[in-house]
Image: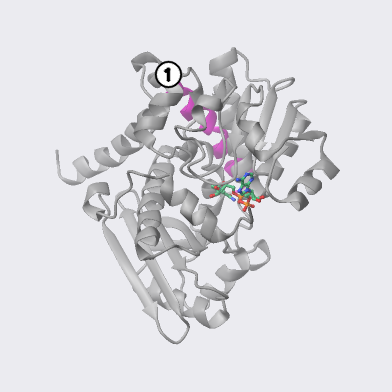
């Protein structure tokens, strides 16, 4: 089967069965639809929560089935950004933007400038950044009409590509989860399978190989597989076989919703830690399924917070040394989540979410004088 964005879209949305488009259910503060006839721009910006600071989140350029799917996506992703910022101890809120792609549509400078003028109108409540199908170069064009953009190239004073930092955070979360599960955080000799060897997966594989882990990789793109085999000693496994491959750690680093009622029973590992956003197709059901199977899961929004920690240095400048230390703090946060979850026999994602929400709620309570 030829994999197109439409196939991916169908896959993702059929796998998030319980997502709704009711903003109030997920507590969003503001959801805005922008349209410009001249450039063909149609975008939705969702600001989930700004209690801790302005909402930060990427701009996704994607061929959705319809506006409803775009809305579902932006609502879900923006809420995840709130949790990510909060649990990582950042003073930012959660937001996201989706730009609806139509056949043959290109991200022209005119379109990106227009998008920038819309973002500027939000007065800084939402700060846009690169995400799926948008790059640092696109941010340069957006920056021509708004100040509220991050993820610019280092040569222009930006923080550059976040992927290496995201990979480092996943690696740190993997070590914490290994410590909890195996009693040691050394990954040497551990069998680790990476699904998706794109920007994050590639950097992660390199870190794991440096530590003498036994690394298996899969991707639907042969070029990506070739690129990693040229620099690391990894074994390539067919995409559908990696789920049931005998592993210590399974690392989903491709799309979301790959942990679901069909794939979780197939897993043959002790731990799941990866970079993909929204790995659990149904958070409630699939968190419990993993727990029932005795598989320790490092919550996605915690494990993949490294890129965000680096990107916000464009707003709050910090040295690379401090960024590294801050990402390494994810180790302690992750252990705390795993301990609390183990003590209460609850899914780790649920516990992590509770910790993230509690931080926000304490600020809200203080504001209300409670
Ligand atoms: P990417 O597009 O560079 O890589 C994704 C890889 O997954 C590609 O090589 C693609 O071919 C592969 N892939 C797609 N479908 C697949 C399938 N069914 N089986 C196997 N491989 C498949 O993206 P990335 O920047 O590396 O991000 C990976 C994931 O991590 C995404 O879900 C992204 O949202 C998330 N994430 C990334 C960052 C970051 O800093 N880049 C930060 C947070 C979260």
- Image point (36%, 31%), residue name: 285
- Image point (25%, 38%), residue name: 362
Magenta part mainly helix, strand or loop?
Answer: helix
Q: Is residue 39 left or right of residue 93?
A: right
Q: Is residue 53 left or right of residue 200?
A: left
Residue 321 sits inside the magenta stretch: yes
Residue wearing tag 1:
292
Pick whichever, 262 or 338, lies toward us.
262
Pick whichever, 81 or 4, lies toward us.
4
Return the x and y of residue 321 as percentages of the image width and height.
Answer: 63, 42
- Location of residue 104 by image quarter: bottom right
Whether residue 94 can be seen here = no
| Residue range corresponding to the magenta coloring | 319-338
- Image point (68%, 20%), residue name: 186
Q: Is residue 33 left or right of residue 149?
A: left
Q: Secondary structure at mark 1?
A: helix
Residue 20 sits inside the magenta stretch: no
Residue furthest to the front: 1
Return the x and y of residue 279 as percentages of the image width and height.
Answer: 48, 39
Relative vertical location of residue 91 with respect to residue 338 in this rendering, above or below? below
Return the x and y of residue 300 as percentages of the image width and height.
Answer: 49, 38
Relative vertical location of residue 95 with respect to residue 295 in this rendering, above or below? below
Return the x and y of residue 364 as percentages of the image width and height.
Answer: 22, 44
Relative vertical location of residue 74 with respect to residue 286 in this rendering, above or below? below
Residue furthest to the top: 183
Image quarter hosting the C terminus: top left
């Amino acid at each position: 089967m030829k994999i197109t964005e439409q196939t991916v879209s169908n896959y993702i949305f059929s796998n998030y069965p319980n997502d709704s488009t009711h903003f109030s259910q997920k507590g969003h503060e503001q959801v805005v639809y922008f349209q410009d006839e001249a450039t063909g721009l149609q975008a939705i910006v969702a600001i989930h929560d700004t209690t801790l600071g302005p909402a930060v989140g990427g701009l996704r350029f994607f061929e959705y089935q319809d506006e409803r799917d775009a809305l579902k996506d932006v609502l879900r992703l923006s809420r995840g950004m709130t949790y990510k910022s909060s649990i990582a101890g950042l003073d930012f809120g959660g937001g996201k933007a989706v730009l609806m792609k139509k056949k043959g549509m290109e991200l022209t400078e005119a379109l990106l400038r227009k998008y920038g003028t819309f973002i500027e109108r939000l007065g800084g409540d939402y700060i846009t950044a690169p995400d799926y199908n948008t790059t640092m170069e696109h941010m340069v064009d957006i920056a021509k009409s708004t100040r509220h953009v991050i993820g610019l190239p280092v040569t222009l004073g930006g923080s550059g590509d976040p992927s290496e930092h995201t990979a480092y955070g996943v690696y740190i979360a993997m070590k914490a989860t290994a410590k909890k599960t195996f009693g040691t955080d050394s990954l040497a000799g551990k069998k680790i399978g990476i699904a998706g060897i794109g920007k994050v997966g590639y950097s992660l594989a390199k870190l794991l190989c440096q530590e003498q882990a036994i690394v298996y990789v899969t991707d639907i793109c042969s070029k990506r597989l070739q690129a990693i085999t040229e620099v690391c000693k990894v074994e390539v496994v067919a995409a559908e076989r990696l789920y049931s491959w005998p592993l210590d750690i399974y690392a989903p680093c491709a799309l979301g919703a790959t942990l679901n009622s069909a794939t979780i029973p197939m897993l043959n590992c002790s731990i799941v830690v990866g970079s993909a956003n929204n790995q659990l197709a149904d958070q409630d059901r699939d968190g419990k399924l993993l727990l029932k199977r005795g598989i320790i899961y490092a919550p996605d929004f915690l494990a993949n917070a490294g890129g965000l920690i680096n990107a916000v240095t464009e707003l709050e400048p910090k040295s690379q040394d401090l960024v590294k230390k801050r990402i390494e703090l994810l180790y302690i946060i992750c252990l705390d989540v795993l301990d609390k979850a183990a003590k209460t026999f609850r899914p780790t994602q649920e516990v992590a979410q509770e910790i993230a929400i509690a931080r926000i709620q304490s600020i809200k309570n203080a504001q209300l004088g409670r």
